[in-house]
Image (cartoon, rainbow, N blue to C red):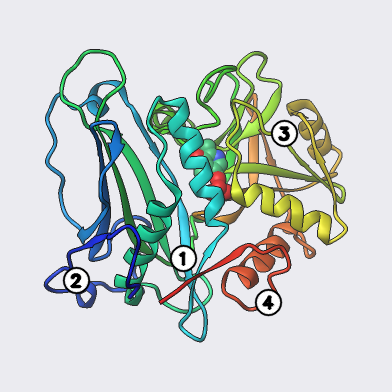
Amino acid sequence: MKNGSTLQLEIQKAPTSKIDSVDFDKLVFGNVFTDHMMVCDFKNGEWQKPKVMPYGPLELEPSARVFHYGQAVFEGMKAFKDDDDQVWLFRPEENFNRLNKSSKRLAIPEFPTSMFFEGLEALLNLDRDWIKKGFGNSLYIRPFVIATEAGVSASPSKEYKFLIICSPAQAYYSGDVRVVFAEQFSRAANGGVGYAKAAGNYGAQFYPTNLAKEEGYQQIIWTDANTHEFLEEAGTMNIFFRVGDKLLTAPISDRILDGVTRKSVIQLAEDNGINVEVRPVAVKEIVDAAKKGELKEIFGSGTAATINPVKGFGYKGEKFELEDQEDSYARLFKNKLMEIQYNKTEDKFGWRHLVKE
Ligand SMILES: *Cc1c(COP(=O)(O)O)cnc(C)c1O
């Protein structure tokens, strides 16, 4: 445990642990939470003393702003345990900076750096046993901020709650994924909140995604809202296309989330001599490439799945299947990322962050 914190973080330990009641071989993603959570309130114009306390329900006014106007943002990150029981985070400062970028867009006060890292590390140390060793095992970390001030006037809340909850995770396998390119619905528009991890972005995707599921697709690849001619991202993941031996992905914009996994893949590709083009990717060029047999892979990138290969896609009623590649880029990046995350290899980019005991 970390002592002598300058923050005087308040720590209230759970009287008993739930860990023995959890079957770590049968985890469903995001369903089980650890013994503790971090909580910090914003009131009177400042963030108060953060607390690490037993995980449990919150009590909120029914009129709290978050329920009415969706003033809420979140993050998703992971902790990994290596063979020597050391716990590592992957590029956590990226998540922290992005949380504040999202907050700013939603008129939520930014969260202080030291509170974030000291609180998170204290929480991870208390719940260390929940992080299991071995490739694929991790602890999914969900920081989030909600507007808690009572009252339904449509104005930014003056009170907020910042929380971090943690959920043990196994290797993410969602079965074969087939996607459909969006023709009608949009995820984000110019000048909107697409680049922020704003809660409302996700709620708005469920209905169109359900329609896609009825047609046999698991996910939608969102296209630009103006023309639906350019492929942007996959809802909870950024998206990559391999045409021949070239890797294509859309540039970051106010509609596209600046994924940590995405930027890591781009850097790994460059480091491995793979030609990456970060530019608008037209639906037409991908459909044409598929017809000519030049489209070798599509994969999504995001913290939960790391790299998620796509088996096929649909567009305007036509369906295309992708063959498994022996020299798969998806597998290459997944392995390279895992080797770094689990401390199996040198950390040449400085992406690993040790959680000090
Ligand atoms: C979180 C998220 C991603 C992936 O970001 P990572 O930092 O790689 O986890 C991509 N797109 C959207 C819309 C997201 O919410």
Q: Secondary structure at mark 2?
A: loop
The numbered mark, 4 or 2, whose residue comes first in the sequence reads 2
- Label 3 and label 1: CA atoms lie apart by 28 Å
User: Please, is residue 262 above or below residue 136 in the view?
Assistant: above
On the image, the x and y values in percent for residue 63 come to: 15, 24
| Residue behind mark 3 | 251
Residues marked 3 and 1 touching at CB (< 8 Å) = no
Within 10 angstroms of label 1, few (less than 14), some, or many (20 or more) residues? Answer: many
On the image, the x and y values in percent for residue 334 come to: 65, 63
Within the image, what quadrant is residue 119 found in?
bottom left
| Residue behind mark 2 | 18
| Residue behind mark 1 | 79
Amino acid marked by disc 4: Thr
Amino acid marked by disc 2: Lys
Q: Is residue 20 visible?
A: yes
The numbered mark, 3 or 1, whose residue comes first in the sequence reads 1
Left or right, 295 with respect to 139, comes to right
Quadrant that contains the C terminus = bottom left
